[in-house]
Structures are given as structure tokens and as C-alpha cells.
């Protein structure tokens, strides 16, 4: 995989995808949860994974993070095959990827500050830097005031935002979002989506966004965030075309049945997709 | 309870997994980073937290031992040997075994349910995703805490029991305190002390931590699964304590003169 760039005199080999699944199959017990799934996320891309519940979306994300191992096929992070990587290499690669779990998965015995600081304290960052960075990311998600609270005291939407902050603290190049708006009201969902769009457009974070809610998916595919003079505005494209670098992947029973931009997805005549979109 | 019995193949696999966890935890205990704060928290929880029930255990075990042995001994006119009997029974067997069973019930169940909840709420996965090894962060501190605290707790239990016996020996049997304490002290040899107050508690402490952490870590099936793991942790570690006590006793007897 190489690609010529510029005037052709300087040929640069395109980097390996940030994350790649090659023909991955995964069983839980006797149940085949993923069946020959291939997937690639290149730098700067956002991939939106759609699928009904139980279609294997969360499993796919866990495989990308090396939290589960495939029964066959390969998982690669920045070209490194996780199946061949040792535990230490894995430990080094994982912080490049941030993950927001489906139910937030905050450490419930730790405060919001300690949750967000977790990664930094683990690598022995000094106290002052930790405090600054934690305040910065909590500011980004709009939760500076909750810094001393315990997770049990937070609402669902706040938990999701703390989980986002916790993943962002190590400044990952890629973010994996597992249904970040599930179970939230429309206003809170909107807020989370805006944060994700800002990360993508203002900070250039690549992402995999898993959802079974089509509305969120189309929001992500059609809105952009523009920062000017310290203020962020959201601009809606006219909605007929998908943003470049944003692609949809549709999962059904552990297989990919669609991959492409949303205008094609909308025109699909596959019965399952039509039903899902309706 | 029938549903809890695993198939032979699953059981063998489980033993293998538990042994592997023990191996990994021991190896990681000597590698950086050392989670000093987590280790101290766990030591406080296991040691200080169990002090009351351990003292009560020692106290009543000592009391009942004195009652039983005093009535036997007075029939043979050997009341002077009460101290020896109480001390030897406590230090060799009852102190370490009952102490470990109490810790299995209190601490083991707590470990299994805590780790189990962390598994079903994906906190353990979140930890791994943040680049932290859950065996180092969660299992090693618990293992070090039980292994270091169990001998101390056993010493406390035995000394409570022996001193409780002293009260009865003096009050009911009318022996002198010196006679009782001398007989207690003289009855114990080096192997009783090393075996009962060090080897056994260290081993039992490791059993409780490894079994309970393994039960917690393999939890599946939501809140009900956590309940199941907790029960398993207590049942399996208690059984293993009793079984391994038999073999450890054989081993210790073999080495003692
Ligand atoms: N740890 C597990 N053990 C057994 N089955 C599982 C486990 N995790 C997920 N599954 C099963 O795998 C299938 C896909 O799960 P998942 O990836 O969570 O789907 P989704 O996120 O799309 O809802 C489901 O049928 C689910 O019941
Ligand atoms: Mg899911």
C-alpha cells in the first residue's frame, strides 16, 4: 500500500492504518459473534459502526483495543499485529487509543479527579502536571465543578463525559466510542455529539463511533465544528452528502453488510438496512 | 447447588487457570511498578479490619478448649498439663485454620464481590484500556496483604486463646498462672511455632487471595454472577484450607524431630 504525494518527486509511503481488523472471527462459547470482519481506520478518518443490539459492535471495539483476542484473523494497531505483540508492547500501544465504554465504566471507588488522572498517575507524571491536565480535559467536557464528586453522585450524561475526559487525558490519536449516547435524553446526547465532533474537527482525533441510533450517526456525518476566536460553532452541511473521511459500516449478526458514505447507505435497497433506517 | 458443580474438564481447566493466576501474581509482585498505596490499603483492610473477628475467634476457641481439656485432665489428675494442651491445639491447628476460615469468609468474599463487580461493569477492561495490568493493580496487592497479615492475625488469635485459657485455668481449675503459662510455653517446640504461625498462615493467606481473586475475575452474567462468584470464593477457599492443612501438617510432622 503506497501512494504518491505532491509532485511525484517525493514519494511517501502511506502509513499503516491506525487500526485494522483482517478477516476477524470471534466466538463466545459456541456462538460466533464476529464472522470474518475486515475493517480499517486510517489517520483522520471517522468510521461510524451501525448495527442492532447483539450484532457484535462492542466486541469489535474490544478487539481493536486488544481487550479480546480473535479466534482467527488479525488485529493490527499502527501496523503491529496484536497477536504477535507481547504484553508490554500492548501496554505501550493502548494509550494511543482512548475508549469510552458503553456504560462509562468509571472506577466507582475513585473520585472524578482520580478517575481522570488514572492514566497519568500510572505512568508517574508529577502532581502539578496531573492537576493541570485533569482540569484541562474536565474543562473541555464542561465538568470542572464535578472534580471532587464520586461517580455515584453523577447523572448518566455526566458519567459519559467523565469517561470521555478519562480517555482523553493521554491525548490519544484515536478514540473509540461505544454507544456514547445510549440511554441519554436528546439534549444530553446532542452535547456528547458536539464534543465528539469538536474532537474530530478541532483536535484532529480519528475515531470509531459505534451506535444503534441513526440520528446520532447522521449528525456526526453532516456537521462540522469550526473554531474561531476561541468560540466553537457547529455548521450543518446540507445533509445530502456525507463529510469526507466519514464512512459508515453496518454490522449484522457479526458480518459487515455495508461500508460507504451515508448517501449510498440511504439509497440502499437491502431490506435489513431499509428497515434499520426507517 | 448442583448447578455449581463443574464438569471434570471445566474443573481441570479452572485449576490450571487459578495456578496460572497465582504464578503470574507472584512473578509480578517483584516487578515495577509497586502499588504501595494499594498494598497498604489492602493490608489495613485485611489486617486491621479482621482484628475483631480474629480476636473473638481466638477468645472462644481458647475458652472452649480449656473447658474441654480441664474436665478430662482433672480426671487423670493432670490439670497442670492444661496449658500444654490448649497451646498445642491452638498453635498447631485451631489458630491457623479457624483464623484462615474467618478471613476466607470476611476478606475472600469481599475480594470476589469487589473484583466481580469491576468485571461486570467493565472497570477491569477500562483499566486495561488505560494501559494498566489488572493482575498487578488488583491481584498482587491483595495477595501481598493476606500473605503478610495472616501470620500476624494467627499470632493474635493464638495468644487471645491462650490467655483466655489462663483466666479459666486460674479461676475454675485453681492452677497458678505460672504453672499454666509454663506448661503452655514448654509444650510448644520450634516446629509448632514455625509451622503453625508462619508456614500455614502464609499458605492459607495465599489460598484465600488467589482463589477469591480468580473467582472475582472470572465473573460473568451481571449481578447474579457476582453473587455466585462470592459464594464460590468462600466455599472453594475454605475447602482448600482444610485440604491443604492436612498435607501441610504431614509435611511439618515429617520435618520435626
Ligand atoms: N463476555 C461475553 N460472553 C458471552 N457472550 C457475549 C459476551 N459479550 C458479548 N456476548 C454476546 O455476543 C453478542 C454480541 O455482543 P456485543 O458485541 O456486545 O453486541 P452489541 O454491542 O452490538 O450490542 C451478543 O449476542 C452477546 O450476548
Ligand atoms: Mg454494545
Image (cartoon, coloured by chain):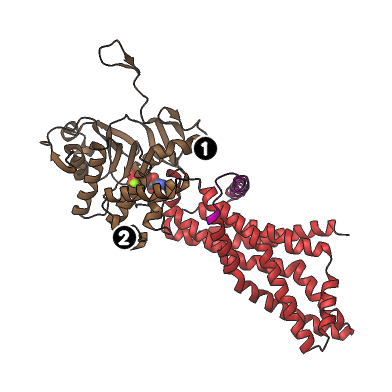
Chain colours: A brown, B red
Choose between B220 and A255: the one closer to the eye: B220
Q: Main secondary structure of the magenta part?
A: helix
Nearest to N terminus: mark 1 or mark 2: 1
The x and y percentages for residue B52 are 60, 74
Picture coordinates of residue A116 (x, y %)?
Answer: 38, 51
| Label 1, ligand 1: CB separation under 8 Å | no
For the point 22% across and 38% down, which residue is it? A273
Q: Residue at x 75, y 67 (%)?
A: B93
Label 2 sits on residue:
A154
The residue under the point 72% across, 76% down is B161
Let me know if residue B23 is in the magenta part: yes
Whether residue B69 appears in this view of the structure is yes
Lateral position of residue A190 relative to residue A162, left or right: left
Q: Residues within 10 Å of mark 2 (few under 14, many from 20)?
A: some
Residue nearest the observer in this picture, A270 or A78: A78
Residue A87 disc label: 1
Q: In the displayed structure, would residue A123 be above or below residue A25?
A: below
Amino acid at each position: 500500500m503506497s501512494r504518491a504525494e505532491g509532485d511525484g518527486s517525493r514519494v511517501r509511503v502511506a502509513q499503516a492504518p491506525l487500526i485494522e481488523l483482517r478477516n476477524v472471527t470471534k466466538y463466545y462459547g459456541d456462538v460466533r459473534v464476529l464472522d470474518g470482519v475486515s475493517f480499517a481506520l486510517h489517520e483522520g478518518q471517522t468510521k461510524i459502526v451501525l448495527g442492532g443490539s447483539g450484532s457484535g459492535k462492542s466486541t469489535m471495539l474490544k478487539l481493536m483495543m486488544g481487550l479480546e483476542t480473535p479466534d482467527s484473523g488479525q488485529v493490527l494497531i499502527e501496523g503491529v499485529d496484536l497477536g504477535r505483540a507481547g504484553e508490554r508492547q500492548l501496554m505501550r500501544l493502548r494509550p494511543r487509543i482512548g475508549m469510552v465504554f458503553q456504560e462509562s465504566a468509571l472506577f466507582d471507588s475513585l473520585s472524578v479527579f482520580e478517575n481522570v488522572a488514572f492514566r497519568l498517575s500510572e505512568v508517574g507524571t508529577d502532581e502539578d502536571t496531573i492537576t493541570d491536565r485533569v482540569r484541562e480535559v474536565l474543562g473541555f467536557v464542561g465538568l470542572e465543578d464535578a472534580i471532587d464528586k464520586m461517580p455515584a453522585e453523577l447523572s448518566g450524561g455526566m458519567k459519559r463525559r467523565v469517561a470521555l475526559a478519562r480517555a482523553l487525558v493521554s491525548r490519544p490519536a484515536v478514540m473509540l466510542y461505544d454507544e456514547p449516547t445510549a440511554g441519554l435524553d436528546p439534549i444530553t446526547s446532542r452535547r456528547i455529539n458536539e464534543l465528539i465532533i469538536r474532537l474530530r474537527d478541532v483536535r484532529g482525533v480519528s475515531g470509531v463511533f459505534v451506535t444503534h441510533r441513526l440520528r446520532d450517526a447522521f449528525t456526526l456525518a453532516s456537521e462540522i465544528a469550526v473554531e474561531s476566536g476561541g468560540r466553537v460553532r457547529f455548521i450543518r452541511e446540507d445533509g445530502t452528502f456525507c463529510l469526507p473521511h466519514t464512512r459508515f459500516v453496518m454490522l449484522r449478526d457479526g458480518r459487515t453488510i455495508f461500508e460507504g458514505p451515508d448517501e449510498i447507505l440511504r439509497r440502499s435497497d437491502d431490506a435489513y438496512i431499509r428497515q434499520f433506517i426507517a | 447447588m448442583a448447578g455449581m458443580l463443574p464438569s471434570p474438564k471445566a474443573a481441570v481447566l479452572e485449576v490450571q487457570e487459578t495456578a496460572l493466576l497465582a504464578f503470574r501474581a507472584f512473578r509480578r509482585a517483584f516487578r515495577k511498578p509497586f502499588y504501595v498505596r494499594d498494598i497498604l490499603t489492602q493490608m489495613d483492610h485485611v489486617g486491621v479490619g479482621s482484628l475483631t473477628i480474629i480476636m473473638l475467634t481466638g477468645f472462644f476457641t481458647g475458652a472452649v478448649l480449656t473447658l474441654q481439656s480441664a474436665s478430662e485432665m482433672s480426671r487423670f489428675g493432670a490439670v497442670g498439663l492444661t496449658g500444654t494442651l490448649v497451646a498445642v491445639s491452638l498453635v498447631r491447628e485451631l489458630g491457623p485454620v479457624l483464623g484462615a476460615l474467618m478471613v476466607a469468609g470476611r476478606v475472600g468474599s469481599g475480594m470476589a464481590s469487589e473484583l466481580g463487580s469491576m468485571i461486570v461493569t467493565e472497570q477491569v477492561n477500562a483499566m486495561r484500556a488505560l494501559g494498566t495490568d489488572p493482575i498487578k493493580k488488583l491481584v498482587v496487592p491483595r495477595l501481598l496483604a493476606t500473605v503478610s497479615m495472616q501470620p500476624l492475625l494467627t499470632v493474635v488469635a493464638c495468644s487471645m486463646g491462650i490467655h483466655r485459657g489462663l483466666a479459666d485455668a486460674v479461676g475454675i481449675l485453681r492452677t497458678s498462672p505460672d504453672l499454666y503459662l509454663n506448661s503452655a510455653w514448654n509444650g510448644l517446640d520450634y516446629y509448632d511455632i514455625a509451622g503453625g504461625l508462619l508456614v500455614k498462615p502464609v499458605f492459607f493467606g495465599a489460598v484465600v487471595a488467589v482463589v477469591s481473586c480468580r473467582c472475582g475475575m472470572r465473573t460473568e452474567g451481571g449481578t447474579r454472577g457476582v453473587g455466585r462468584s462470592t459464594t464460590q470464593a468462600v466455599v472453594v477457599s475454605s475447602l482448600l484450607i482444610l485440604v491443604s492443612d492436612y498435607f501441610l501438617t504431614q509435611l511439618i510432622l515429617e520435618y520435626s524431630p
